[in-house]
Image (cartoon, grey):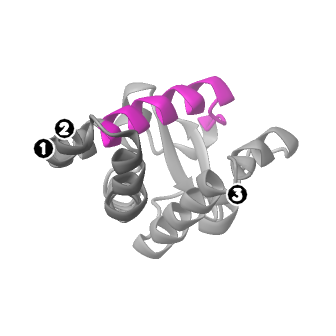
Amino acid sequence: MSNNTDDLQLASMRSRATAFVIDDLLVTAIILIIFWNNIMAVSHDVNAMMYFMKTDLVMPLIFLKLVYQTVFVWYYGATIGKIITKIRVIDSNNWGRVTLFSAILRSIGRIFSEMFFYIGFLIGFFNDGRKTFHDLTGKTLVVNA
C-alpha cells in the first residue's frame, strides 16, 4: 500500500459498497460457525429463532463487528473487504495511519449507522470527502490503496 500523499484518490462508493458486502458476509459466516448448533436447535420454530436472534445473537454480533472493524482498520488500515477492493482508511487530518482511538470511534459510528437504517452511510453521498457518519466520528477518509 502506497503512503505517498501526492497521489491519494478518494475511494469510489462502489468500492466501498463492495467492501462492505464482503466484510458483512465474512462476519456473518463467523457468527454462523460459532452459533451453528444453537441456530439448528431453534431452526424448526420461527418464534424460538426470533427470540434467539434478539437475546443471544445481537450482542455477540455487535461485539464481533466492533472488534473486526477496529483491529483491521487500526492494524492494517483496511478490513479484508477493503483489502480485496484495494481501498484503505487513513486519518483525515494527517493522511497517515489511523490511531487505535480513531479506529474504535469509527467502528462505533459504523454500528450506529447500521442500527439506524444505514442513514450514516448515505451521508457519504452528500459531501466532498465522501465521508460517512463513521468517517466523521473517526476522523477518517477512505482512499484507493
Amino acid type at circle 3 is Phe
Q: Is residue 3 left or right of residue 25?
A: right
Residue at label 2? 40
Judged from the image, the secondary structure of the residue bearing numbered disc 2 is helix
Q: Read off the residue under disc 1.
A: 37
Say whether residue 103 is left or right of residue 49.
right
| Circle 2 or circle 3, nearest the eye | 2
Looking at the picture, tell me which residue is in the foreground, 36 or 72: 36
Label 1 and label 3: CA atoms lie apart by 36 Å
Q: What residue type is disc 2 on?
A: Met
Instruction: Give the mark nearer the N terminus: 2 vs 3.
Output: 2
The circle drawn on residue 133 is 3
Residue 75 coordinates in the image, percent (x, y): 31, 58
Mark 2 surroundings within 10 Å by alpha-carbon count, few (fewer than 14), some (14 through 19), many (20 or more): few
Q: Quarter of the image containing the N terminus?
A: top left
Which of the two residues, 21 or 47, is positioned nearer the viewer here?
A: 47
Picture coordinates of residue 80, whole percent (x, y): 34, 37
Residue at 43% in and 58% down:
54
Residue range (magenta): 7-28
Please give the name of the residue rendered at 62% of the width and 33% of the height, measured from the top-left corner.
11
The earlier-in-sequence mark between 1 and 3 is 1
- Observer-side mark, 1 or 3, equals 1
Q: Main secondary structure of the magenta part?
A: helix
Say which quarter of the image contains residue 61. Answer: bottom left
Q: Height in image: 50 above or below 64? A: above
